Image (cartoon, rainbow, N blue to C red):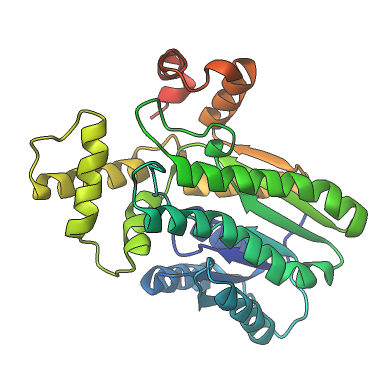
Amino acid sequence: MKDFGGKLAVITGGGTGMGRALCRQLIQEGADVATCDVIEENLLETKRLCEEEAPQGRKITTHICDVSNEDQVYEFAQAVRSAHDTDHIDLLFNNAGVGGGAQFVDGDRDEWERTFNICWFGVYFCARAFIPMLHASQDAHMVNTSSVNGFWATIGPQSAHSAYSAAKFAVKGFTEALVTDFANNAPHVKVSVVMPGHIGTSIAINSGRILSGSNSDEITDEQIERVRARFSAMGLGEDATDDQLREAVKAMGEGFRDNAPTTAEQAAAIILDGVREERWRILVGDDAHLLDQMVREDPENAYTEAFMEKLRESTQWNLS
């Protein structure tokens, strides 16, 4: 698929970040877009931007859908059929995700499973719901977003990251299995796994809202206690007030978005280039390439402090 003109792309998590950037770039290239998210105001902004930038005749539709809910996913698929008057799609970007659910041993089980369900079952349910429409296309491509945490299940020796990492490993394994599955059973459908490094998105900001089920940007008292426990485990914030912790979390989310070595727009362009080249494995960012190389070279030490120190000292890891 060298040209996206006239194609229909379905993109989950299109309200912000890489999802929004994919929507904008695809519609600028002449594709029609159907996108979903759980935060309506973000979706409306994506739609406004796309409609301003779309070539004449191109169309974007937006849909509220929690991708961890299978019933909602099938309703989303039916809504795409109706809104675009079609029985097929050409591109499916399983992009939606959240961060959270850090600790398995004594963390909050509901948050752990909510994170896992969005990041893994969101991909699986959408793949199930949309595979008949991809199969009905003459030339189709499924793109599943994993992460560097799909091959390195941590963010450092002192920071558990188990729900997100477990889900992203599942996405990676599922996608790799589909390479052979599709080649034998649907050879006109290609598949890619995307493994981004640090991308400048609002995932850290939006995750709290999604996991709490609240539209408020304010961190709840229950959430702040979990934040305090995580910070304390790292020897941080033991004397901080609740308000100071709230400010710290806000600053971290904004810093993650604003100080990343790769922007969401750059990430989307890399992903689309990978689709054009029919690469099944798309690493996004110099940091992702570096980490992939380091883990492959020394897997036994990948979870040690010495490995982390080597990573911190590398030029590529300090691009920001």
Report whether 62 appears left or right of 232.
right
Outermost residue, front side: 105
Q: Is residue 139 above or below residue 178?
A: below
Q: Quadrant of the C terminus?
A: top left
Q: Position of residue 155 (x, y in %)?
A: 42, 32
Place residue 238 in its image quadrant. Answer: top left
Q: Is residue 76 above or below residue 166?
A: below
Q: Quadrant of the N terminus?
A: bottom right
Report whether 253 appears left or right of 132.
left
**Which residue corresponds to the image point at 67% horizontal and 82% vertical from the top-left?**
84
Report whether 59 appears left or right of 159.
right
Q: Position of residue 315 (x, y in %)?
A: 45, 18
Q: Is residue 185 above or below residue 252?
A: below
**Which residue corresponds to the image point at 65% horizontal and 44% vertical from the top-left?**
172
Whether residue 90 is visible here, answered yes or no, is yes
Q: Position of residue 183 (x, y in %)?
A: 89, 51
Q: Is residue 51 above or below residue 84?
A: above
Place residue 140 in its image quadrant. Answer: bottom right
